[in-house]
């Protein structure tokens, strides 16, 4: 009898995708990381045992995800990996509860109790601005280009953003006697860096000084991150950082002690020595600009009243030609693609293919905390879309012609198709000189007065 070979696996939505053992290794390795261990060799050894059991216990040559995960649990328990098996079981349970919750949501309802991760009050004000400035739809945006008022739209959007920043700074100043840490958090490419700089400018005028704290220095060595079958590393999760050391240092800073943060060399992908020592003085606030600033283990032990949590997201309220609202994540993808290509030597396709890691992490560790913050800044700029159409539409159009329909990177294809349809519906604008040198958009297209 021939041994069963698994070439495909059935996902929960019924779709059939290519099967690879690396996915099992990564599932075990991620559970190990969650349990405080980083032994990839152990994960690879357990994967071999999982494959053996799958071949003996699963009769079909196309197993389901549930069948594979059941066997992973069994192997972890039989191997005596109690902590790792618990982490894996908890992860499965969390995902199951989220699916049930999602299935219960009525897509035609806007009941906030059904979608507590959406900042409805802020969105309502953003929607009013969109209506007032005649950019509530893509067609209206195109009209503002056709009637010659597009430069005016840029000014209007910048004024709205600056007002948002001023209000955020005022909220911090109202708590000046108790706040020691200002945390600027939000998903990738939402505009955290520019927002942080501008808030610092406001506070400096009031006699306060921000001391930036570079959380990226706490990354584990790149070789210790999970790596998928395409050679891509998952470095988007909080577990990519040494949270234990980071939390220890933040608590010591709060207590008035001097700390010596590590230094992460992004060229070598390793931590190498330490960077400049940090100690807070009177009139100084520690500024933490990070994706995962709202993730509780990061600042555990620091009193709530000593932290000011600011959240930024591209809360665009604009309907496309199909009648649906433009997805915030698509705007951020366009920004990151451009920045990665220009500043980080990452290809456009590399950012697109990596985006599923970005989304998975933000949906789990960032977005759920949006309504537990002190202030929300809208980082969306309705006027940026014509620039993205001019810069990137041809790239997405080419992908639509060259990416095979049966690609194992189905997520990339679906996303590329959707974004191309959006960009194709927008009148392009090529003259970037109309964008102010201190605009948030300059963080991504270049030419800013600020140093990033």
Image (cartoon, rainbow, N blue to C red):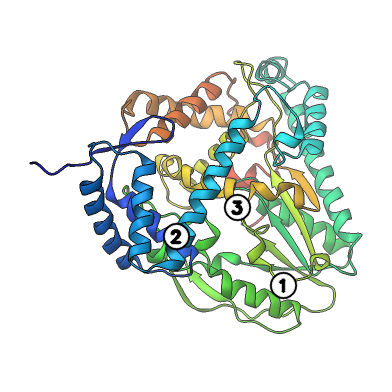
The reply, left or right, for residue 177 in relation to residue 449 is: right
Q: Nearer the viewer, residue 131 or 57?
A: 57
Q: Answer whether residue 446 is visible to the viewer in this image.
A: no
Q: Answer whether residue 382 is visible to the viewer in this image.
A: yes
Quadrant where the image shows the C terminus: bottom right
Q: Position of residue 189 (x, y in %)?
A: 60, 46
Where 258 falls versus 30 (above or below)? below
Which callout, 1 or 2, points at the residue further toward the start of the chain? 2
Residue drawn where x is 26% and y is 48% of the image = 54
Q: Position of residue 298 (x, y in %)?
A: 64, 66
Q: Which residue is mark 1?
A: 301
- Dot label at residue 31: 2
**Picture quarter containing residue 66?**
top left
Where 287 falls versus 414 (above or below)? below
Q: Which residue is mark 3?
A: 365
Which callout, 3 or 2, points at the residue further toward the start of the chain? 2
Callout 3 touching callout 1 (CB < 8 Å): no
The reply, left or right, for residue 334 in relation to residue 88 is: right
CA–CA distance between discs 3 and 2?
16 Å
């Amino acid at each position: 009898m021939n041994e069963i070979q698994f070439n495909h696996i059935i996902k929960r939505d019924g779709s059939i995708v290519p099967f690879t053992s690396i996915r099992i290794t990564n599932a075990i390795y991620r559970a190990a990381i969650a349990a405080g261990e980083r032994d990839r060799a152990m994960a690879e050894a357990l994967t071999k045992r999982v494959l053996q059991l799958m071949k003996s216990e699963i009769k079909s040559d196309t197993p389901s995800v549930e069948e594979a995960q059941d066997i992973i649990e069994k192997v972890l328990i039989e191997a005596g990996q109690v902590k790792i098996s618990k982490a894996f079981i908890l992860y499965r349970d969390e995902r199951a509860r989220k699916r049930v919750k999602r299935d219960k949501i009525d897509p035609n309802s806007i009941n906030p109790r059904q979608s507590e991760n959406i900042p409805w009050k802020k969105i309502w004000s953003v929607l009013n601005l969109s209506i007032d400035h005649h950019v509530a739809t893509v067609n209206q945006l195109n009209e503002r280009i056709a009637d010659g008022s597009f430069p005016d739209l840029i000014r209007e959007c910048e004024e709205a953003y600056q007002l948002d920043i001023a209000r955020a700074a005022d909220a911090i100043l109202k708590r000046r006697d108790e706040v020691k840490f200002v945390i600027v958090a939000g998903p990738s490419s939402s505009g955290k860096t520019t927002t942080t700089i501008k808030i610092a400018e406001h506070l400096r005028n009031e006699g306060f000084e921000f001391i930036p704290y570079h959380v990226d220095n706490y990354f584990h060595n790149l070789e210790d991150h999970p790596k998928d079958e395409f050679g891509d590393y998952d470095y988007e999760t909080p577990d990519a950082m040494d949270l234990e050391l980071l939390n220890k240092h933040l608590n010591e800073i709060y207590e008035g002690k001097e700390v010596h943060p590590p230094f992460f060399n992004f060229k070598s992908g390793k931590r190498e020595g330490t960077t400049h020592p940090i100690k807070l003085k009177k009139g100084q606030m520690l500024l933490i600009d990070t994706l995962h600033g709202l993730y509780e283990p990061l600042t555990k032990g620091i009193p709530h009243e000593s932290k000011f949590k600011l959240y930024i997201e591209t809360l665009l309220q604009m309907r496309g030609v199909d009648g649906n609202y433009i997805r915030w994540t698509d705007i951020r993808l366009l920004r990151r693609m451009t920045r990665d290509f220009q500043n980080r030597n990452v290809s456009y396709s590399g950012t697109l293919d990596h985006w599923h890691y970005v989304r998975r992490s933000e949906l789990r560790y960032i977005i759920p905390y949006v309504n537990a913050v002190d202030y929300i800044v809208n980082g969306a700029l309705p006027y940026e879309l014509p620039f993205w159409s001019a810069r990137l539409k041809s790239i997405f159009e080419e992908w639509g012609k060259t990416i095979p329909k049966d690609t194992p990177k189905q997520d990339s294809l679906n996303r590329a198709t959707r974004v191309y349809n959006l960009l194709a519906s927008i009148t392009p604008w090529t003259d970037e000189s109309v964008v102010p040198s201190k605009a948030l958009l300059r963080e991504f297209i270049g030419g800013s007065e600020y140093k990033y």
